[in-house]
Image (cartoon, rainbow, N blue to C red):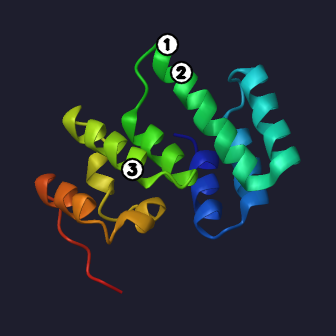
Amino acid sequence: MTADYWLAIAYETQGLYDLSVDAHLKSRAGMNIEITAMLKDAYAKDGWRGFCRERLAQAKKRAKLSHFEPYYMALDYLRNSDKEQALQWLEKAYESRSSWIPTIAYDPLLDSLRSDSRFQDLIRRAGLPQPNPS
């Protein structure tokens, strides 16, 4: 992961979507130019929602062609307000022993799942400490 990726996440959690998209696109420097153009176009047309829909569409395509990190897929589903699919992909991440599973107890992008008993069970099964409620 590049510093731009982490910056994109930080901006996203603060709702600073213009900055998040800019940082995300910078993190893709040197990657598929077509996909980057599609992401830019989606954001220009439909804002953050369009960007998230296009990210998910691209992730689905990549997942069909080769292994795709299930944790990232979960985040893309969550960005599109699909908690059921996000939980299913987090379960796949757990089953595949994703290196991202230790972050689930504190990842702010997963905050909307915290009250779900299935998510709490996943944290427990992963052997992670339950975060203290704010």
Q: Is residue 128 above or below residue 42?
A: below
Residue 84: assigned label: 3
Amino acid carrying mark 3 in the image: Glu
Q: Is any atom of residue 126 visible in this view?
A: yes
Q: Nearer the viewer, residue 49 or 95?
A: 49
Quadrant of the snapshot with the C terminus: bottom left
Mark before the other along the chain sequence, 2 or 3: 2
Amino acid carrying mark 1 in the image: Leu
Task: Give how far across and how far down residue 33 sits, in percent.
Answer: 77, 22
Instruction: Give the structural element (helix, strand or loop) at label 2.
Output: helix
Write down the quadrant of residue 121 in the picture: bottom left
Amino acid carrying mark 2 in the image: Arg
Write down the quadrant of residue 24 in the picture: top right
- Residues under numbered marks 1 and 2 in contact, where contact means CB atoms less than 8 Å apart: yes
Q: Nearer the viewer, residue 104 or 51?
A: 51
Write down the quadrant of residue 11 in the picture: bottom right
Q: Which residue is mark 1?
A: 65
